[in-house]
Amino acid sequence: MSMARPAEMDEALRAVLLDMRQAVARLAQALEDERAAITGGDTHALDCAGTLKQSLMHDLEQLDIERQQLIREAPGAARSLSADWADIVAALRQCHQLNLRNGSAVNQRLGQVRQALSILTGHGGESSLYGRAGELRASLRSQVLAEA
């Protein structure tokens, strides 16, 4: 093994970690954008943020595969960059918390919509998908609410 090879591996790992750091920063921004879309009820922005979030997660998965391969080939490089990796892991944990927060907001909004639908339809929600005789109701929203 030549002396240049470990330096090249170290530089390659450094580049992958930089790409990961940038992708995580873009993911955090996408999660903030998703939160704003949820709060503002902007379905188009929510869809865009979700698509971007998926794309960034795919990119991060590919970068992590590359990172793991480089570590297998040059374990010394990983030790010298362990602080960088720890920062990335901490940023990913923060993204996880942002994602949980967004999921909670979506669930809260979904509960409000279900409650409004149950008021409009006169049913108690999902638990009343079956009638008293056990028959399946095809749709809760197909009932006539008023006649002219």
Image (spheres, grey):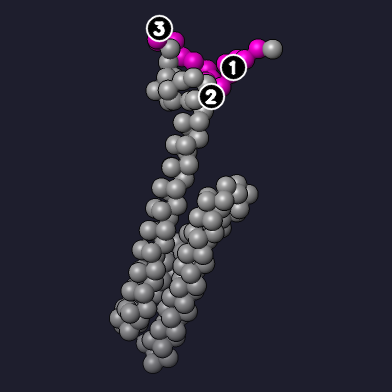
Which residue position is annotated with label 2? 120
Name which residue lies at 39% across and 92% down.
3
Residue 28 screen position, x and y as percent: 47, 64
How far separated are the C-alphas under marks 1 and 2? 8 Å
Q: Residue furthest bottom?
A: 3
Amino acid at pointer 3: Ala
> Which quadrant holds the N terminus?
bottom left
Task: Please check the rendered image and state whether residue 139 is part of the magenta-colored stretch, yes or no.
Answer: yes
Amino acid at pointer 2: Leu
Q: Specify the principal SS of the magenta part.
A: loop
Give yes or no for contact between labels 1 and 2 (Cβ–Cβ under 8 Å).
yes
Residue 133, disc? 3
Query: Vertically, is 25 above or below 36?
Result: below
Between discs 1 and 2, the one toward the N terminus: 2
| Camera-nearest residue between 19 and 121 | 121
| Camera-nearest residue between 92 and 12 | 92
The magenta segment: 132-147
Task: Please check the rendered image and state whether residue 133 is part of the magenta-colored stretch, yes or no.
Answer: yes
Name which residue lies at 43% across and 81% down.
14
Which residue position is annotated with label 1? 145
Q: Nearer the viewer, mark 3 or mark 2?
A: 2
Query: Vertically, is 43 above or below 92?
Result: above
